[in-house]
Image (tube, rainbow, N blue to C red):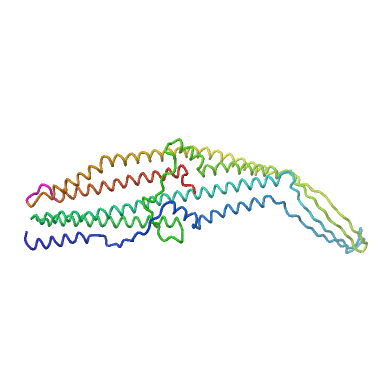
Amino acid sequence: MNRRSVSLLSIALASMVVASPARAQRVEGPTITAEEIFQRWLGHSREVASLRTQVRGARFDVITAALWPNPSLQVNFLGTPAGTPPDGRTNYGLQVTQALPVFGQVRARREAAVAALSMTEVSVATALWNIASQLEALMVERAFANARVTMAERNLGEVTRLQEIIQRRVAAGANSQYDALRVQVGASTLGAALNDALVERDRAEARLAALLADPTMSAVPITREGLAAFRGPEDLHGLLALALRRRPDLELARRGVLVATASATRWSRENRWTPSVWVGAYGTHDADSLSVTAGLSFPLPVFDRNQGLVGRARSDAEGQRLLSEALEVRIAREVTGAWTARAAAREAIARFRAQGMTATAELLRRAEVTYEAGGSGSASFTIQDLFDAYRTMWDARSQELELQRTFAEAEADLDRAAALVVP
C-alpha cells in the first residue's frame, strides 16, 4: 500500500470519529419517577387547583339550598286629598311577609344540592382521570424516546469497534480504504438517527411538561426505569370487576341518575302549597287609630304545576341510566382489548428475545472473526458483509425496543381502562 493510500485511509478513519451529531446534546440530570410526576402534578398544577374549586362551589350550593327565603317588608301610605276619609285623612301601613316552605320543600332542595355535589366530585375525578391517563401515555412516549437516544448513542459508539477491526486489517497489509469510507458513511447515518431521536425526545418532553403545567419544573427526565409498575391484578375477571368499581365516567353516569331523580322530587315538592304569613300594622292620622293586621296566603297551582320540569328530570334520569348501561359494555370491551394486547405484546417480547437476539449476537461475533481473519488477499468476506451484520444487530435492538414500547403502551391503555391511574 503506497504512502498516498495510507494518508487517505488515515483521514477516513479519523473522520469516522468526527461523524457524531453536530447538534449539542442536553446533559441529562437526575431522573424522575412516574409517582413523583403525579405528586408534583396534583400538588402544583393550577389546572388541578381550578378543578377542585368546582367542588367547593357545589358545597356552597348545599348551604344555599337549606336556607329559608328572606322575608319581605312592605310600607304603605294612603292620603285623602278630597272628600271625607273613611278613617283618618292620612294613613300609614307596615307589613312583613314570610314564606313558609314547611311541606318538605327545603329538604328536597337540599337533597338535590347534595346529589349535585356528589356528581360534581365525580365529574372532577373524571377530569383528573383523563388528564392522568394522558400524563401516563406521555411519560411512556418520553421514556422510550430517551431509550431510542440511548440506543442510537450505543450504535454510534460501536463504530469505534469497526474502526479498530479495520486498523488491524491495515496492519496486516490489507488495503481497506473502501472499508473505512463505507463505515464513515454508516456512522453519518447513525449520527442522523441520533439527531432524530434527540428531537423526538425533546418534543415528547415538551408535551409532557405542557400537560403537567408545573411552573417549578423546567424538565421532566423520566426514563423507562421510572415508569410505574402495573398496579392491577393479572387476571382478566379481576380487572373487569375493578374497572366497574373504579371507572369515574361510569360512576358519573350513575350519579347522574341520582341527580335527575332528586331534581324530579324537588320540582314535585315545589309544586306543593307554600304558605306565606304576613303581619302588619295600620295607623291613621287626624282621627288617630292603630290596627294590627295578619293573614295567610297560598299560591294556586292551577296552570304551572312544574309538570315540564318534573318530566324533564325524569327523562334525564332515564338517559343517564341508559348511558351507564352502555358504559358497562364499553368498559368490558376496553379492558378485554387492552388486556389481550398487553398479553400478546409480552409474548412477542419473550419470543423475540429467545429466538432473535441470541442469534444476532452470535452472527455478529462470527462476522467479526471472519472479516478480521480475511487478510490482504481475501475477498470472500467484505466490509459490506460485516456492516450488514452490524446493521442486523442494530435493527434487532430497534425491533426489541419497539416491542417493549408496544407493551408499555398496551399497559398504559389497560391502566386507563381499569382506572388504575385514578389519583
The image position of residue 235, as x and y in percent, is: 43, 36
Q: Main secondary structure of the magenta part?
A: loop
Question: Magenta includes 378?
Answer: yes
The image position of residue 202, as x and y in percent, is: 36, 57
Q: Is 266 above or below relative to 192?
A: above
In this orientation, which residue lies closer to the viewer: 41 or 183?
A: 41
What residue is drawn where x is 16% and y is 50%? 384
Q: In which quadrant of the rendered view does residue 230 lie?
A: top left
What residue is drawn where x is 57% and y is 43%? 255
The image position of residue 107, as x and y in percent, is: 69, 45
Q: Is 217 above or below relative to 294?
A: below
Question: Magenta includes 376?
Answer: no
For the N terminus, give its image quadrant. bottom left
Q: Which residues are magenta?
A: 377-382
The image position of residue 348, as x and y in percent, is: 32, 40
User: On the rendered structure, is 160 left or right of 253?
Assistant: left
In this orientation, which residue lies closer to the viewer: 335 or 216?
A: 216
What residue is drawn where x is 26% and y is 57%? 192
In this orientation, which residue lies closer to the viewer: 341 or 232?
A: 232
User: On the rendered structure, is 130 left or right of 358?
Assistant: right
